[in-house]
Image: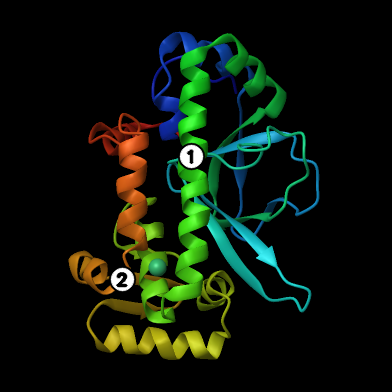
Amino acid sequence: MPIESSGPTGNLLLDALSDPDRALIAPHLERTTYARGETAFEAGAAVTHVIFPCRDTILALVVTTRDGRTAETATIGHDGAAGAVVGGGRVPAFAKGMVQIGGSVLRLEADRLEEAAGRSASLHDLFMRYADCFVAQLLQTAACNALHPIEQRCLRWLLTIQDRIEGDTLPVTHELLAAMLGVQRTYLTRILRVLQDQGLIRVGRGRITVLDRDAVSASACECHARLRIRCETVLGTVYGPASRTAIASADG
Ligand SMILES: [Zn+2]
């Protein structure tokens, strides 16, 4: 299906492009759908496309250790793009791109994006700013994993997901959450029970509901708020108040 040169796509980065910039890449965007748990790209594989999650779709960049354990290093939803964002598609993926919440994405050949960036300074600037936010997320996550307790990291992760989907109920399983946080499932279940007893969340089968966003924000570590401020500063027009309305009205 051809992508229109104007109108909401369901991805904030694409929707922030000016009409002339959008026209440079619109003919090359292709829409596809990912299922939860699907691998968008493997670590070590060539990254030929930039992937723009639309609406509620969320990808995670996951690092797997030699003994098979995993940890999430970045969460990418309708606010951004995955694959070839920093390396430009000329180097293999370092982390695996895993679909956390399935749905619609737009894909663009990395070469096409580079070509468009070469022709438009404003398009180049937007993607450089996004790359800054992406790297900030990696840096903050490294600090968070080293310094903050698991309960706070868990709440941070729930806030990060909630930012990227509609509503308070997050379609995440204990298995997924344990894999993202790099802990055993049984340990995670104990953590969730404590957070539930504190009235912060309600745990259901295959879903977790954020009961009190303000209380969860107050109990989480500062990493989530710091990143939001950073991204709103660097990409203000992308994350402005109109963005949620645009997402809600996208055809995705
Ligand atoms: Zn933290």
Task: Determine the residue positioned at 52% across, 64% down.
Answer: 142
Task: Determine the residue positioned at 52% across, 11% down.
Answer: 23
Q: Which residue is mark 2?
A: 220
Position of residue 194 measured from the top left corner of the image (x, y, whole percent): 33, 89
Q: Is ligand 1 closer than 8 angstroms to the Cβ of mark 2?
A: yes
Q: Quadrant of ligand 1?
A: bottom left
Q: Which image quadrant for residue 65? A: bottom right
* Residue type for callout 2: Ala
What is the crowding at mark 1: few (fewer than 14 residues within 10 Å), some, or many (at least 20)?
some
Position of residue 248 measured from the top left corner of the image (x, y, whole percent): 32, 38
Counting labels gives 2
Task: Determine the residue positioned at 68% across, 76% down.
Answer: 69
Q: Is residue 123 above or below residue 134?
A: above
* Residue type for callout 1: Asp
41, 181: nearer the viewer = 181
- Give the mark nearer the N terminus: 2 vs 1: 1
119, 176: nearer the viewer = 119
Answer with left or right where residue 82 lies relative to residue 193.
Answer: right
Q: Is residue 211 visible?
A: no
Q: Which residue is mark 1?
A: 132
184, 173: nearer the viewer = 184
At numbered mark 2, what does the secondary structure look like: helix, strand or loop? loop
Q: Are marks 2 and 1 in contact (CB under 8 Å)?
A: no
What is the crowding at mark 2: few (fewer than 14 residues within 10 Å), some, or many (at least 20)?
many
Q: Is residue 213 above or below residue 134?
A: below
At numbered mark 1, what does the secondary structure look like: helix, strand or loop? helix
